[in-house]
Structures are given as structure tokens and as C-alpha cells.
Amino acid sequence: MSNDTTRRDFLRTSAVAGGALAIDLASNVHAQQGNDIIRVGLIGCGGRGKGAIEQCLRADAGARLVAVADTFRDRADDCLMRLRNNAAVRAKVDVPNDRVFIGLEGYQQVIANSDLVLLATPPGFRPTHIRAVIAARKHLFTEKPVAVDGPGVRMVLAANEEANRHSLTVVAGLQRHYQTGYLESMQRVRDGAIGTITSGRCYWNQGGLWHAAREQGMTDVEWQIRNWLYFTWLSGDHICEQHVHNIDVCNWAINAHPVRATGMGGRQVRTEAHFGHIFDHFSVDFEYPNNVHVLSMCRQIVGTANNISESVTGTRGMLETAAGPKLYRITGERPWTLPRDQDNEPYQAEHVALFESIRGLNRRARINDLRNVAESTLSAIMGRMSAYTGQVVSWDQALNSQQNLMPERLTWDMNMPVPEVAVPGRTRLT
């Protein structure tokens, strides 16, 4: 969004774009209209990086992967092997050994060699990487969230202004914004199908996730980066890294970001040392303008019930959404349900939209998702800050916080002990 474009305008035009995205993505219909080569660079070759680059290369006939970077050689090699074994994209992989960059500074060389950069590193690195991509006047796909603290969000907001000034395309990995079911649901909310929104709920409750054993010879930094999920300086905690999707949907529906958060949470079950220092559950009351409250709940505990969904209640009805089971339903005065076969594959759709915007083929202004993803990221950070400290945290407090979780100068061999687990009432706001 440009500075003078409201989120309401964005949603109205998104619904039009959503119809355009409901094409046979494998046919690359739009890509055939512009086959100039677009040099793509990938920064971050882990699980999400592997998936994102495959989707990127499938989305456009002229996409070519020309450079990759990762902290670890094994991940870069594994990613390239997977791509070269994939018949659908192998012809689009042009990455000789001298364009495989390993280490903490490899991102700079990828940016220099690319027209479009994909960021799939741990979130703590993203503000620095986003700023560097935009400063180099390159187009960008960035995974979510885009920061882990207030200083990082401020850096991304500044990059957003710069991207607007130079008409750069930026797509963020909040893929529900490119999913037909969510686009149609939000358009109906805008058209008054549920009346004035009075409250909401959102959830990402699930079991546990992976961890990597600490092998002999690993430095603190290597071990923590390989287990980035469990360290707030890298992930922002799971309320930020994962639950941001659901919080974003509530922001989207309400057409605003929360103004304050009252949260609680803890580390009750996942207490072993290899799980770092993050919480395993959160519950947050987000207060939005006009006294609208949203209950936010997220949990990563083995053996517990799964629930990944959102709902908003209005004066005339209720909208329920869930990406996993593809549920899009309005109950009340104007009932509606989207048939499951009318939904699309959003991870692929966001990359089709990315190239359409770069090539000027889409039906709306050039895409820049940075402000939206920055606001949703800060919403989640605000909830984490409240839960960690036990204090009510306002939007301005979160945005202007001076707590910079990233080390000022990160080196491979630095001593980096695991931080203490936050304790509400003792851990202080900064």
C-alpha cells in the first residue's frame, strides 16, 4: 500500500485481484505475456526457503534462480539438489558454485546478483535484509514476520517508505491475502454482511515441532540458529513467528491494528534446555478502536487439541475462517459458505501476483505488502511483550520500544548464553 492508500482501498482492489488469481497456476498464463529473464536470489535455504523458491520458479516463465545464500553449507547444497531433481524447475536453476554464498554476510552478494530477492531466513535477520534489498532497489518476497522487536519494525516501516518512492514490488508471506476464500470473506465483511464488528477470536493451537540436537563443536550461535524457533531474538516466539497469520486476519477484518494488549502465557510443558527460552502457550486480549476486543490464543504442546482458525462477530452475523480445513462461512442475517472447490492454492498464488506486479500485468497498482505485514508483526510483538511482563502494553509502547533483541554485532564464535525465561511481574518492559 502506498502511504495515501487505506487498507479499505487495498481490500477492495484485492478482491478483484483474487479473481484474477483463480487461474490454472501451472499454465503460467500471464507469464507468457512477458518472458524477459528475472534473476532471482534466495536468502535462507531451509524448509520455507525450499518451498518458496520452487513456487517462485513455477510462477513465471522468465524466472531464473541465479544465487543462493545460507548460514550453513549443508542447507544450501540440499536446497540446490532438490531443485535440480525437480523436473518442473531444474531448467530455471543457474547457480554455479561461485554464486553459492555461505555465512552471515552472504546475503549481500545475493542481492548484488539479483533482480528479485526471496527472504526465508529466521525473522530476526529480516529487518537488516529487507533494508538492504530495498536500498539496492531490488524487488522482494519476504516471509513473515518481518521483525522480532520494535526497532526491527521501525526499520521495516522506513524500508516501506523507500520501496514506495522507488515503485518496488514487495510481497509478504501472509498468503491468506492471496487466498480466494479469505478475499471473498473480507469483501463480504466490507459489504456489511455481518454488520458492525463487535468482537473476534483467533487461534493457532497445535502440538510440538522439531528441534536439532547440539553436536560436538557447535558454537552457541550455530546451535541457536539451527534451532531458531526457540529463541526470541531469532523467531520472536511462536506468537510472532506462527500466530501472526491469525492476528493478521483479525486486523484485516476489523480494518485496524490493536491499540493495546493484555496477555499472559508461560512455559509449562516444553521446559527442556533444547527448547531455548520461549513460552509454549499464550493468551492475549487485543483491544482495537471502538472498544472491539479480540481473544488471541496460541499453543505448541504435544497431546493438545488443534485449532487454527479465526472468527469475527458483528451486529448482523459472524464470519468464521480456517485455512487448513478451508472453512469460510457467514452465519446470521446473510448466511454464506464458500464451496471448498472454489478456493485456490495461496502459496503459489502469491508468487504469481509477485511477478504480475513486477511485470506490470496485474489489475491494480504495484504491490507493496510491507506496511501491512509490519503492522501485523508488531501486533504479535505487543502481545508477547505483555505476556512476558504481565503489563498492559500499548501500540506506541511496542513501536517505540528500545529493546533490540538482535546482537549489535553477531559473530560466529561469540559467547551467547541462552536468555532466562521471561517471568511476568519480574521481566520489565524496555
Image (cartoon, rainbow, N blue to C red):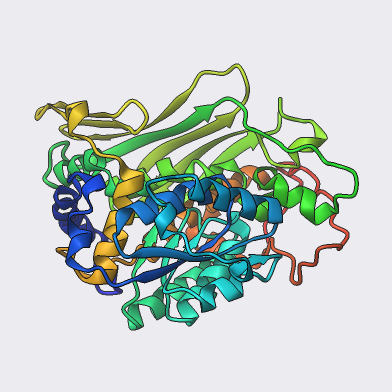
Please state the horizontal and vertical placement of residue 55, each as a whole percent of the image: 38, 50
Please state the horizontal and vertical placement of residue 281, each as a whole percent of the image: 61, 32
Please state the horizontal and vertical placement of residue 361, each as a whole percent of the image: 18, 66
**Where's the N terminus, which quadrant?**
bottom left
Residue 324 found in image quarter: top left
User: Which residue is painted at 65% across and 33% down in the image?
Assistant: 210
Q: Is residue 290 visible?
A: no
User: Which residue is painted at 47% across and 39% down in the image?
Assistant: 285
Q: In the rendered image of this protein, does residue 204 appear above or below residue 108?
A: above
In front: 262, or 234? Answer: 234
In front: 426, or 156? Answer: 156
Counting labels gives: 0
Residue 316 found in image quarter: top left
Question: In the drawing, does residue 342 fall left or right of residue 351?
Answer: left
In front: 63, or 152? Answer: 63
User: Which residue is painted at 21% across and 69% down in the image?
Assistant: 34
Question: In the drawing, does residue 114 fall left or right of residue 319?
Answer: right
Please state the horizontal and vertical placement of residue 194, each as a whole percent of the image: 17, 36
Q: In the rendered image of this protein, does residue 148 appear above or below residue 87?
A: below
Question: In the drawing, does residue 250 fall left or right of residue 413?
Answer: left
**Where's the C terminus, which quadrant?**
bottom right
Q: Is residue 415 visible?
A: yes
Residue 233 found in image quarter: bottom right
User: Which residue is painted at 69% across and 60% down in the image?
Assistant: 405
